[in-house]
Amino acid sequence: MHGVQNMLRGGLNDRGAALITVLLFMMLTFILITTMLVSTRNEVVIAGLHRDGVRATEMAHAGLQEAISRLQFGRNVPPDLVYTFNSSLNSPRGTATITYRLPVSVGPSGDYREIVVNASAGKANREVRAIVLVKTALFIPNNTLGDGIRQPGNPNPIRSGDVYSRSFVQYQELPSNAGLPEDKKGVTYAGWRVSRCKDPLCSNSADPDRILPCYTHAACSAIDPGWYPGTRLSESEKSEIGKEIVQWGRQHCSPDGKLIGDVPTQSDPRAEVQNGTGDYFKYGFTKDDRTFDNKAIPAQIDLKKFPCGLPYKYVQHDVVDETTQISTRQTLFFKTIVFEQWLDSYWEFKETSLSLVKKPSLKQYPEMGAIPPYPDTYLTQKNFDVTLKPADVGPANIGCHVPEMTCASGKSELVAAWVDGNWVVNKPGGLRGHGMLLVDGDLTIDNLGASFAYWGVIIVRGKLRVNTGQMIIHGGLIAQDVVTVNGNFTIDGGGGIATTTVGTTTVTVKAWYER
């Protein structure tokens, strides 16, 4: 009996152990399954966060590229202002801001800016910051450019900086480089001729200062060694003529510098235009290896970039007669090169001054100059800080320049201003400004004794006339038509007058980080 009971008791114990064992295994299995589910869920969350992070990072970099593209195509951002926009690929959750980074980061030809981009995707947020250098090639800084320049009634000379005219230059007072620092010394380039007279006809033979028009540097050098009439013209690579010249150059020059097809050499008489008649060759290459007096010099063109030299084309050009101020089609052909290629060959960008400066080759051989085209500013019309009607522009300031003006912030304030239409400055009290001023029409200064002083660049899409009063420009002047001066008019080019960068630019990323 006891044996049976012991046997039954032992069997019951075995059954209990088996039950416990099964329960333990079930519990372990449940724990494993729960752990796997939790781990899988966490991995899904982590993968989702990683995916959101990658998407947000890509969106942030896309916003950075969009900001760079906006700068490249003329989006002006004045100092002390922040330009913010929604990123196109991440709107409305992604934003980008562009601002100047340093108080002294603006120069005549470029500036430093900070771009900050914030982007979000799901639960991830990313920020990308970049410091970029913005350079403009819209125009050469601190120079005077016009289709013709007359100053018969102006006793003040153009103090400094180069003078460019696509037709003529007629001085009353000669520019002087005496006592000027190197960065302010200038020369005169004219597409047609240069003279010095007090009346447009140069008819007063009793005028002791009269200099009849000269058409070549050889004829002019005895009068002023810095006069270069007959200088070649240049056209933008974006113009029809510029595109044609670039395309011709690519077709007729191999990368190793060998000429392809029928291309004249410098000694080939077909390269010269004979009064616009006869069978002449319109195209060619120049290595700029001869001076105006036909003296052989080393090639001034970088043959690594331009193995055959700069391509050119002889182009018939309208010239303006200073006696009539009427543009007349004459049998005049000008050797025309591409502005950007010439700029790359003879100018360099100095990051210390944020300005374009002449290379030593152009300083040594000024005859290698080229008259710039009128800059294309139509793309920048909507990118100016201030758009004004001529009637709205009264005796007030446009921007502020320290120390000549009293600025509210205590430092210079740049403004890019657009005047929509012909503008006559004839209100007493004067007007001052700093930055970029573009007049979409004619600009007439008739200030009745008051002064118009400007620090920066003035671009006039028509004629500039100074009848009475005083106009002083510390920086540069560009006029698409003739500049006529009878009042007190002073151009003080050269130096480092800061201005806003408008128009197409080159943007270089100098530093960046993301978080």
Image (cartoon, grey):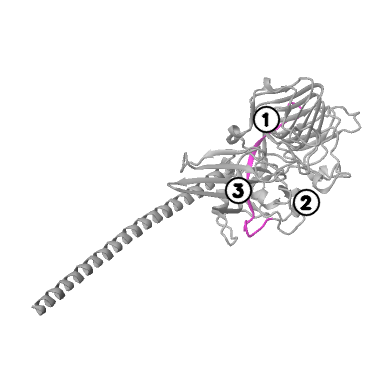
Image location (x, y in percent) of residue 502: 63, 39
C-alpha gap between disc 3 and disc 1: 41 Å
Q: Which residues are magenta?
A: 301-324
Which residue extends farthest bottom? 3
Looking at the rendered structure, the kind of residue marked 1 is Thr
Residue on which the image places disc 2: 363
N-terminal of the pair, mark 1 or mark 2, is: 1
Q: Which residue is mark 3?
A: 507
Mark 3 or 2, nearer chain start: 2
Q: Is disc 3 placed on a helix, strand or loop?
A: strand
Residue found farthest to the left: 1
Residue 338 at least partly seen: no
Q: Quadrant of residue 107?
A: top right
Q: Which residue is mark 1?
A: 328
The type of residue carrying mark 3 is Val
Residue 462 visible in this rendered orientation of the protein: yes
Where residue 434 appears, as percent x and y from the top left, is: 73, 34
Residue 334 percent across, percent down from the top left: 67, 42
Q: CA distance from mark 1 to mark 2?
A: 33 Å
**Residue 501 left/right relative to 491:** left
Which mark is on residue 462? none
